[in-house]
Image: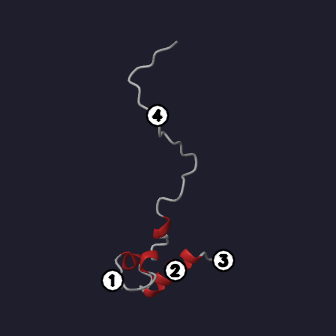
């Protein structure tokens, strides 16, 4: 099975914490270079993804009533 870098980091953190997911979430080793990646997500990409089938409503206003022409 091929691991992505984030999955490999998550696996390493699980091994380091004795395979306890709670210990990974509550990790106290803040100076570890993998600390911010320990939950399997890249904190540098926060807000960069677009959800599938997402519809942007920017620029649209809520109308209280509709008037047919």
Image-quadrant location for residue 6: bottom right
Q: Secondary structure at mark 3?
A: loop
Residue 48, horizontal then vertical, whole percent: 51, 59
> Which residue is labeled 4 in the image?
60
Give me the C-alpha separation between circle 2 and circle 1. Answer: 16 Å
Give me the C-alpha separation between circle 4 and circle 3. Answer: 44 Å
Question: What is the number of the mark on residue 9?
Answer: 2
| Residue most extreme to the right | 1
Tell me if mark 4 has few (under 14), some (14-19) or many (20+) residues whose alpha carbon lies within 10 angstroms of its own: few
The nearer-to-camera label among 4 and 3 is 4
Residue 50, horizontal then vertical, whole percent: 54, 53
Q: Secondary structure at mark 4?
A: loop
Classify the position of the N terminus by image quarter: bottom right
Tell me if mark 2 has few (under 14), some (14-19) or many (20+) residues whose alpha carbon lies within 10 angstroms of its own: some
> Which residue is labeled 3 in the image?
2
| Residue most extreme to the front | 59
Disc 2 to disc 1: CB gap under 8 Å: no
Disc 3 to disc 1: CB gap under 8 Å: no
Tell me if mark 3 has few (under 14), some (14-19) or many (20+) residues whose alpha carbon lies within 10 angstroms of its own: few
Q: Secondary structure at mark 2?
A: helix
Residue 56 lies, with reference to residue 24, above or below; the image says above
Tell me if mark 1 has few (under 14), some (14-19) or many (20+) residues whose alpha carbon lies within 10 angstroms of its own: few
Residue 66, horizontal then vertical, whole percent: 45, 19
Left or right of residue 52, residue 22 in this image: left
> Which residue is labeled 1 in the image?
28
Disc 2 to disc 4: CB gap under 8 Å: no
- Precedes in sequence: disc 2 or disc 3: 3
Give me the C-alpha separation between circle 2 and circle 4. Answer: 42 Å
């Amino acid at each position: 099975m091929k691991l992505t870098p984030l999955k490999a980091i998550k696996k390493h953190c699980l091994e380091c914490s004795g395979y306890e997911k709670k210990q990974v979430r509550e990790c106290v080793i803040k100076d570890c270079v993998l600390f911010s990646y320990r939950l399997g997500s890249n904190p540098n990409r926060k807000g960069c993804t677009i959800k599938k089938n997402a519809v942007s409503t920017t620029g649209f206003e809520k109308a209280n009533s509709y008037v047919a022409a």
